Image: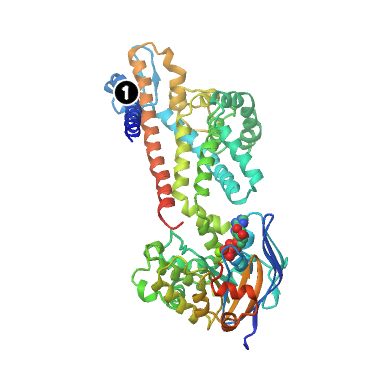
Amino acid sequence: MGNSEKIKTEKLNAWFGQKQALRDINLSIRANVVTAIIGPSGCGKSTLIRTLNRMHELVPGAKVSGRVLLDGKNIYDDDVDPVQIRRRVGMVFQKPNPFPTMSIYDNVAAGLKLMDAKKGPALDEVVKKCLQQASLWDEVKDDLKKPGTSLSGGQQQRLCIARALAVNPEVILMDEPCSALDPIATAKIESLIRDLSKEYTVVIVTHNMQQASRVSDYTAFLYLGELIEYGLTKDIFENPKNALTEKYITGEFG
Amino acid sequence: MRISVTGDAIFKVAAGVLVASAAVILFATLYVLSTGSTIVLQRFGLGFFTGINWNPVEGRESFGVLPYMLGTLVTSSIALLIGVPLSLGIAIFLVEMAPKVIRVPVSYLIELLAAVPSVIFGLWGLFVLRFWVLNYIETPLSASLGGIPIFSGTPFGLDLLTAGIILAIMIIPTVASVSREVISAVPNSIREAAYGIGATKWEVIRHWVLSYGRSGILGAIILGLGRAIGETMAVTMVIGNAVGPTAMPTSLFQPGQTLPSLIANGFLEAPTPLEKSAYMGAGLVLLLISLLINIIAHVMVSRILKIKGGAVE
Ligand SMILES: Nc1ncnc2c1ncn2[C@@H]1O[C@H](COP(=O)(O)OP(=O)(O)O)[C@@H](O)[C@H]1O
Ligand SMILES: [Mg+2]
């Protein structure tokens, strides 16, 4: 419980055009732990994590109000560059989406190449380190020039994790990263998520409650765009305070 | 069941007949142009492609299409040089930046531009554009850079540059709308992934959208090139219609001639079989170039559509 607060949302509301997807979300996400966001389909899980790195506003007509504090600074302040926020708060998407025109190597290196930060052997080192962190290195080290899309679904997703790690983020958001994967690939990603939380703050959206209980330290339950309950994962699953939460985790709806 | 099988069969036969007749028309055209140009090709051989004279006077006949091939090359290049950046800019703006209230009507307007008959472009070129080009482009260029050969000579407004500019305008609908479709076909997941690693909007467009769509965009450009090469009426009305050695392009401010404008200008008046054959030969060269360009374009456009269907969504 001693971890410091990494992200805090205050009265966070989000809309798609006229449709409100989030209502007054107040959530405090701790550093270096895994926070799971659960809730039935359409309750606003994806919307919530996409407001945390300013991806939400990329959807035409999308709007946000309220504050999202990253290390105490509101990322929606006028003087904040969303590009910088997206480097500090990386993202892994529901469907593995490696860049189809790029090799495995270039997929990982893409973010660093944009920043022009590293070249040659130094870049090779980072690519290797990130692929190792994503536990993909051993499987691809001889095929770095092959297209990223030549990998299996689970490998592609780990490649996407490596790609996100390469720009050295502080937070990693994952939107149902295993929903398109088989159980073995899922297990690999889950153990990876545990490892990553030692160095990064991880927020994972999942509609799979077993997954939430396996990988997360904290769990937030969302329903119809509202935060219903938030606490230690153990408490949420063993001792939910809210009747809705209890109904959801016992599988009465969702 | 039986009815649908018969319907299917009828449809297949009908489609087969239509496809076959398209092929027959194409090959018949090729055949007519080839046989029509045998006289001139037998008489001048390769000289028909390298010669610069166009002299129908009996006893001193000499026919060569080099100036018109070069005229076509120059005007089409100007068209691409000006038209492609504009078209890509329009396509990128429409897909990546414009709100829907602008995107829909502007896309429609651009497609309407493709429906304007080329003689209308020609009229506008002859009565309006020509003077703009003369006053705002050629006169200042001639005054400042007149020493450079391609800007030399007294500008008149009916010349290679004006023809190239009008072609640039005419290829915009094709290049812009095909590019717009190609860019819209780039999956959003690629854009999001790129934004997710901290790419700016411009970087997303440049490194991801254009790179993913490059072969389709190249196809769009080549379709535009095909249109520029084959365009006849508008060019004929503004290019100045030089014939023979004076049609060899040296300056942009000089009257020129393209293969289509040459044919449009002279064919009906050709009295001798040899001269007629020379026009047929020019037509054959034009058709072969156009076919080649279009085949390349279609291969490229279909390749991007395959990527779209195949790889990650
Ligand atoms: N691009 C969009 N345009 C309009 N409405 C959307 C869009 N994306 C999501 N929504 C709506 O916002 C609500 C929350 O969606 P989302 O955050 O994707 O839910 P979840 O990830 O929990 O399934 C849903 O009602 C959904 O229909
Ligand atoms: Mg979702």
Residue at (48%, 46%) from the top-left corner? B217
Disc 1 is attached to a residue of which chain?
A: B
Closer to the camera in the image, A134 or A188: A188
Q: Residue furthest bottom?
A: A2
The C terminus of chain A: image quadrant: bottom right
Q: Which residue is mark 1?
A: B28
Decide which of B29, A136 is in the foreground and name it.
A136
Q: Is residue B182 left or right of residue A62?
A: left
Residue B16, given in percent of the width and then of the height, sits at 32, 30
Above-or-below relation of B313 to B196: above
* Quadrant location, the N terminus of chain A: bottom right
Across and down, in percent, residue B144 comes to: 63, 39
Label 1 Cα neighbours within 10 Å, binned few <14 / some 14-19 / many ≥20:
few
Residue A137 in the image, given as x and y percentages of width and height = 39, 75
Q: Residue at x 52, y 74 (%)?
A: A209
Element type where label 1 sits in the image: helix
Q: Ligand 1, what quadrant? A: bottom right
Location of residue B31 with respect to A185 vertically, above or below: above
Residue that sits furthest to the front in the current view:
A252
For residue A169, say whether it is visible. no
Q: List x then y, in percent, for residue B67.
A: 42, 28
Quarter of the image for residue B289 reads top left
**Which residue type carries mark 1?**
Ala
